Image (cartoon, grey):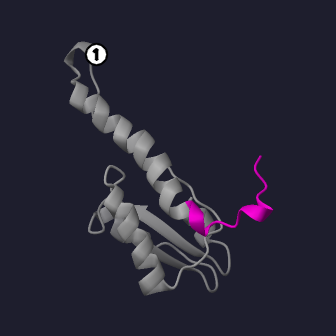
Amino acid sequence: MVTVYLSKSDVTVIAAVRDLESISTKALSSLPKAKNSSLITVKIDSSLEQDAIAAVRTLESEHSISKIDVVIANAGTSASLGPVASITAEQVLDNVTVNSLGSILHTSKYFLQYVDMTNLNIQ
Protein backbone atom coordinates (compact mmCIF):
# COMPACT_ATOMS: atom_id res chain seq x y z
CA MET A 1 0.00 0.00 0.00
CA VAL A 2 2.88 2.38 0.73
CA THR A 3 4.18 1.92 -2.81
CA VAL A 4 0.74 2.52 -4.32
CA TYR A 5 0.18 5.78 -2.45
CA LEU A 6 3.72 7.07 -2.98
CA SER A 7 3.23 6.64 -6.72
CA LYS A 8 0.56 9.38 -6.59
CA SER A 9 1.51 13.07 -6.78
CA ASP A 10 1.17 15.41 -3.82
CA VAL A 11 0.77 12.67 -1.20
CA THR A 12 2.33 12.27 2.23
CA VAL A 13 2.38 8.67 3.41
CA ILE A 14 2.75 7.99 7.11
CA ALA A 15 4.10 4.50 7.70
CA ALA A 16 3.75 3.25 11.26
CA VAL A 17 6.32 0.56 11.98
CA ARG A 18 7.31 -1.51 15.01
CA ASP A 19 11.04 -0.83 14.61
CA LEU A 20 12.39 2.35 13.02
CA GLU A 21 15.85 0.75 12.65
CA SER A 22 14.83 -2.49 10.90
CA ILE A 23 16.05 -3.29 7.40
CA SER A 24 12.50 -3.31 6.03
CA THR A 25 11.78 0.11 7.55
CA LYS A 26 14.96 1.58 6.12
CA ALA A 27 14.05 0.13 2.72
CA LEU A 28 10.87 2.22 2.71
CA SER A 29 12.93 5.39 2.27
CA SER A 30 14.27 4.14 -1.06
CA LEU A 31 10.84 3.57 -2.60
CA PRO A 32 10.12 5.71 -5.66
CA LYS A 33 7.97 8.75 -4.99
CA ALA A 34 5.82 10.78 -7.38
CA LYS A 35 6.15 14.56 -7.67
CA ASN A 36 5.72 16.34 -4.31
CA SER A 37 5.12 13.08 -2.44
CA SER A 38 6.92 12.10 0.74
CA LEU A 39 7.18 9.39 3.35
CA ILE A 40 7.14 9.84 7.13
CA THR A 41 7.86 6.85 9.37
CA VAL A 42 6.74 6.72 12.99
CA LYS A 43 7.13 4.00 15.59
CA ILE A 44 3.99 2.25 16.75
CA ASP A 45 4.10 -1.04 18.57
CA SER A 46 0.38 -1.83 18.44
CA SER A 47 0.48 -3.46 21.85
CA LEU A 48 1.54 -0.15 23.43
CA GLU A 49 -1.09 2.60 23.57
CA GLN A 50 1.58 5.17 24.42
CA ASP A 51 3.25 4.54 21.03
CA ALA A 52 0.11 5.74 19.24
CA ILE A 53 0.00 8.83 21.47
CA ALA A 54 3.68 9.58 20.82
CA ALA A 55 3.26 9.06 17.06
CA VAL A 56 0.40 11.55 16.90
CA ARG A 57 2.42 14.10 18.87
CA THR A 58 5.39 13.60 16.54
CA LEU A 59 3.22 14.03 13.44
CA GLU A 60 1.76 17.25 14.83
CA SER A 61 4.93 18.82 16.21
CA GLU A 62 7.60 17.69 13.76
CA HIS A 63 5.62 17.35 10.52
CA SER A 64 2.66 19.76 10.99
CA ILE A 65 0.15 17.01 10.19
CA SER A 66 -3.38 18.21 10.97
CA LYS A 67 -5.43 16.07 8.57
CA ILE A 68 -5.28 12.45 7.40
CA ASP A 69 -7.24 11.28 4.37
CA VAL A 70 -6.79 7.50 4.64
CA VAL A 71 -6.01 5.24 7.61
CA ILE A 72 -5.08 1.62 6.93
CA ALA A 73 -4.72 -0.29 10.18
CA ASN A 74 -3.11 -3.60 9.32
CA ALA A 75 -0.84 -4.48 12.23
CA GLY A 76 -0.82 -8.15 12.96
CA THR A 77 1.03 -10.91 14.67
CA SER A 78 0.70 -14.61 15.16
CA ALA A 79 3.23 -15.48 17.81
CA SER A 80 1.37 -18.57 18.96
CA LEU A 81 1.64 -20.97 16.05
CA GLY A 82 1.38 -24.64 16.82
CA PRO A 83 -1.01 -27.10 18.40
CA VAL A 84 -3.65 -25.53 20.64
CA ALA A 85 -2.44 -27.70 23.53
CA SER A 86 0.94 -25.90 23.44
CA ILE A 87 -0.41 -22.32 23.28
CA THR A 88 -0.46 -20.34 26.51
CA ALA A 89 -3.10 -17.83 27.59
CA GLU A 90 -0.39 -15.15 27.52
CA GLN A 91 0.34 -15.86 23.83
CA VAL A 92 -3.35 -15.62 22.97
CA LEU A 93 -3.67 -12.33 24.88
CA ASP A 94 -0.60 -10.93 23.10
CA ASN A 95 -2.18 -11.76 19.74
CA VAL A 96 -5.51 -10.21 20.73
CA THR A 97 -3.77 -7.09 22.03
CA VAL A 98 -1.84 -6.46 18.79
CA ASN A 99 -4.40 -7.72 16.28
CA SER A 100 -7.52 -6.23 17.87
CA LEU A 101 -6.83 -3.61 20.49
CA GLY A 102 -3.78 -2.16 18.77
CA SER A 103 -5.05 -2.06 15.22
CA ILE A 104 -8.60 -1.02 15.97
CA LEU A 105 -8.77 0.77 19.30
CA HIS A 106 -5.44 2.58 19.39
CA THR A 107 -5.51 3.56 15.74
CA SER A 108 -9.12 4.67 15.90
CA LYS A 109 -8.78 6.52 19.17
CA TYR A 110 -5.74 8.57 18.21
CA PHE A 111 -5.67 8.78 14.41
CA LEU A 112 -9.27 8.97 13.26
CA GLN A 113 -9.62 12.39 14.89
CA TYR A 114 -7.60 13.66 11.89
CA VAL A 115 -9.90 12.14 9.27
CA ASP A 116 -12.54 14.35 7.68
CA MET A 117 -15.65 12.17 8.04
CA THR A 118 -17.95 14.45 6.01
CA ASN A 119 -16.90 13.17 2.58
CA LEU A 120 -16.35 9.49 3.31
CA ASN A 121 -17.21 7.11 0.51
CA ILE A 122 -17.17 3.75 2.26
CA GLN A 123 -17.71 0.80 -0.04
Residue under the point 35% across and 56% down: 49
Residue type, numbered disc 1: Val
Picture coordinates of residue 40 (x, y %)? 46, 76
Picture coordinates of residue 21 (x, y %)? 26, 68
Number of marks: 1
* Residue 86 position by quadrant: top left
Picture coordinates of residue 76 (x, y %)? 41, 44
Residue 38 lies left or right of residue 34; in this view the side is left
Range of magenta residues: 112-123
* Residue 3 position by quadrant: bottom right
Structural crowding at the residue carrying mark 1, measured as other residues with C-alpha within 10 Å and reported as few (<14), some (14–19) or many (≥20) = few
Q: Nearer the viewer, residue 13 or 118?
A: 118
Q: Please say if 37 is above or below 79.
A: below
- Report if residue 113 lies within the magenta region: yes
* Residue 92 position by quadrant: top left
Residue under the point 23% across and 13% down: 85
Q: Please say if 5 is above or below 86.
A: below
Residue under the point 41% across and 48% down: 102
Residue to which mark 1 is pinned: 84
Q: Nearer the viewer, residue 21 or 119?
A: 119
Quadrant location of the N terminus?
Answer: bottom right
Q: Please say if 51 is above or below 94.
A: below
Residue 53 lies left or right of residue 82; in this view the side is right
